[in-house]
Image (tube, rainbow, N blue to C red):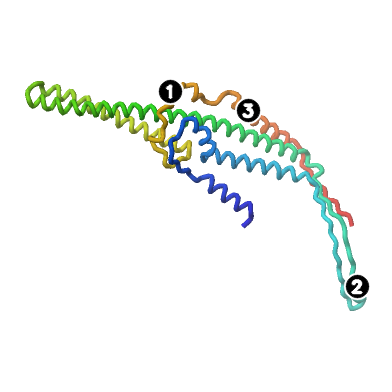
Amino acid sequence: MSILKIWLILSFSFLWTEVSWSKEVKYKDLPSLIKTNKKSKSLDFLIDSEKERISFLTRSFVPEVKLFAGQEEFHSNRLGDHSSSYHGVEARANVFNGMSDYWEEEKRKSELELSKAQKKISYGEMVYEARRSYLNLAEAQKIKAELNDSLSRLSGVFKKVQLKVKGGVISQSDLISLRLVQVELEHKIKDLDGVISIELARLKSFLSLSDLNINDIDQEVLGLTPDQKQPIGKPLLEEKFKAESGIFASESHALSGKKLPSVDLVAN
């Protein structure tokens, strides 16, 4: 198996490996964790591949020179045996290809810049979405804790009211009203569990952390301002558009060029 094949196998194996996490995930750690998630690794792999495509095309402009030498032996009943040696130089150069190779290289360079711009945009979007899920989880966790505390205290009150109803101090309707409040709190807690489940799944996906749980969320994040979760800015979108324009221009020039054969020179 070639080194390239082994490298590809290892790259893809590493690409889809989920990371285990056994400590609290800090809000400030989100950008660095996203840099190593599955999607970021995929984009890094794509960029490395496009860099290799550019270097491969560049090498096609380098002339190839070969030296050859040998000896031939002839056997003939009439002329007898004799031998003849030979040697020479063979050169091959892509001296002119209608500029299509040049524009193909420019196109690949633009594709590389486009991939880099797309990676920046994708990274910015993932950081924004991960931060939003993180904040939603922290807020949901806080509200759920408050509701659970209220439900616990209400359960104590409910038991006391039950005793008073049995003693005839208050009516049954008061107990029913209290029970309705309990049911409402239980429904709100159940709804929050659904929100936590969805946001936690989103955050796991963004961070590629398989065993992330709600207890890994830092509650101190609730003191941060909304400005710290702003989406990507206009400059990155302009960078993407510039790279796309470069690709279209290179394709246009390449199609307009006339492709001529390469030149082989042989000297004996």
Element carrying mark 3: helix
> Where is mark 1, residue-wise?
223
In the rendered image, which quarter contains the N terminus?
A: bottom right
> Where is mark 2, residue-wise?
82
Task: In the rendered view, tell whether residue 151 sits above or below residue 257.
Answer: above
Q: Amino acid at mark 3?
A: Glu
In the rendered image, which quarter contains the C terminus?
A: bottom right
Q: How far separated are the C-alphas under marks 2 and 3?
A: 71 Å
Tag 1: Cα neighbours inside 10 Å, few (<14), some, or many (≥20)? few
**Pick the front one: 165 or 70:** 165
Name the disc covering residue 268, or none: none
Tag 2: Cα neighbours inside 10 Å, few (<14), some, or many (≥20)? few
> Hey, which quadrant is residue 107 in on the image?
top right
Q: How far separated are the C-alphas under marks 1 and 2?
A: 96 Å
Q: Is residue 91 left or right of residue 227?
A: right
> Where is mark 3, residue-wise?
239
Q: Are marks 1 and 2 in contact (CB under 8 Å)?
A: no
Element carrying mark 1: helix
Question: Upstream in the sequence, badge 3 or badge 1?
Answer: 1
Question: Upstream in the sequence, badge 1 or badge 2?
Answer: 2
Residue at image coords 14%, 22%: 174
Which of discs 2 and 3 lies nearer the camera? The answer is 3
Query: Residue 63 appears at what percent x and percent y?
Result: 81, 47
Residue at image coords 88%, 63%: 86
